[in-house]
């Protein structure tokens, strides 16, 4: 298939927020750079922006120079907000939202990478749209912004909103963009240069299948763990878990001893505590809210279990 001929380069803008994910940003920008190099044409032009025009530090502590502040966002065909850890703690200000609305009003497209969808949602720019975000943040986004439809796929394109889940998901989204604007042949060449053997569809899931994550193909164990993950806020009893996978309580306990050297109760408690730990680290939610979201009926019970598991309290976790 021949490459399409563009009358002029397509402009892209990348807004880098404090603690943005470097791998997510690289996955967005490298495919379009390579598209120009491999084709010998300037199909794409891009600029980078921070909130104030000053260099911005990524989550890996690398400082990145930018071309201007968000006030300079004027005419990019596609503007992508790239963020990373602690996105809930980042104050993007009013100007970024104002500029993004301006771009939409003038027929342009906007989007986000990694945790950037949280920022767009705060501006109300994802109301009534389907989007995605890094899988660690999906539940939080769903809870805080119920008017936004959040998917677990690697990237989502809903009309003029482009979002991807971070990591290397942006690579596949931009290969799709290159294919759409110039042609699949060039997207394939870029993919090969990047040693990216298979271009993933947006519908591909972000997380590996449970059998790979758990290291087992035992269908009963996988079903039991899936039921646990689906009932973190409202934990099932061991009897209910056993009934869910059509086993006796004793059979279920034997399987978990065999595969994890733990009882189902111990395993279940740990994944609930892991969820609480993740929420403590990534959000500013009240400890009681986090306890309830992790399946505990009180802060005191949550704190007791947390200290026994990690050696310190939830409050100390947040202060360290």
Image (spheres, rainbow, N blue to C red):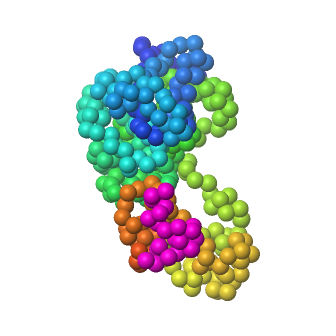
Residue at 42%, 38% in the rendered image: 18
- Picture coordinates of residue 24, whole percent (x, y): 52, 38
Residue nearer the viewer, 157 or 214: 214
- Whether 47 is drawn above or below 141: the answer is above
Q: Which picture quadrant has residue 171?
A: top right
Residue at 45%, 19% in the rendered image: 45
Q: State the quadrant of the N terminus.
A: top right
Residue at 37%, 44% in the rendered image: 90
Residue 115 among those drawn in magenta:
no
Residue at 53%, 13% in the rendered image: 41
Q: Which residues are magenta?
A: 300-320
Residue 319 among those drawn in magenta:
yes
User: What is the chief secondary structure element of the magenta stretch?
Assistant: helix
- Whether 286 is drawn above or below 76: the answer is below
Residue nearer the viewer, 117 or 148: 117
- Whether 150 is drawn above or below 12: the answer is below
Q: Is residue 163 visible?
A: no
- Picture coordinates of residue 89, whole percent (x, y): 38, 49
Residue nearer the viewer, 36 or 74: 74
- Picture coordinates of residue 204, whole percent (x, y): 56, 48
- Whether 273 is drawn above or below 122: the answer is below
Q: Is residue 222 visible?
A: yes
- Picture coordinates of residue 197, whole percent (x, y): 68, 36
- Tell me how many marks there are: 0
């Amino acid at each position: 298939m021949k490459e399409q001929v563009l009358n002029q380069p397509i402009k892209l803008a990348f807004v880098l927020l404090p603690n943005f994910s470097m791998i997510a940003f690289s996955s967005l920008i490298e495919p379009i750079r390579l598209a120009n190099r491999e084709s010998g044409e300037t199909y794409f032009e891009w600029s980078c922006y921070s909130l104030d025009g000053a260099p911005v530090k990524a989550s890996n502590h690398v400082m990145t120079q930018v071309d201007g502040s968000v006030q300079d966002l004027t005419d990019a065909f596609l503007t992508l907000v790239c963020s990373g850890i602690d996105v809930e703690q980042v104050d993007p200000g009013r100007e970024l939202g104002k500029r993004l609305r301006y771009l939409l009003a003038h027929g342009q497209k906007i989007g986000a990478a990694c945790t950037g969808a949280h920022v767009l949602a705060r501006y109300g720019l994802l109301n009534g749209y389907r989007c995605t975000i890094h899988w660690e943040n999906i539940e939080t986004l769903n809870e805080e912004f119920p008017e936004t439809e959040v998917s677990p796929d690697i990237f989502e394109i809903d009309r003029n909103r482009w979002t991807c889940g971070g990591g290397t998901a942006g690579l596949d989204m931009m290969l799709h963009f290159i294919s759409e604007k110039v042609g699949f042949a060039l997207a394939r060449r870029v993919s090969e240069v990047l040693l990216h053997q298979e271009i993933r569809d947006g519908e591909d899931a972000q997380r590996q299948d449970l059998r790979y994550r758990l290291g087992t193909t035992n269908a009963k164990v996988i079903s039991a763990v899936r039921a646990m993950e689906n009932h973190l806020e409202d934990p099932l009893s061991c009897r209910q878990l056993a009934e869910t996978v059509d086993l006796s309580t004793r059979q279920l306990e034997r399987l978990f001893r065999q595969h994890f050297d733990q009882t189902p109760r111990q395993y279940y408690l740990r994944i609930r505590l892991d969820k609480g730990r993740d929420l403590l680290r990534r959000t500013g939610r009240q400890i009681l809210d986090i306890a309830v979201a992790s399946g505990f009926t009180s802060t005191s019970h949550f704190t007791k279990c947390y200290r026994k598991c990690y050696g310190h309290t939830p409050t100390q976790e947040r202060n360290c």
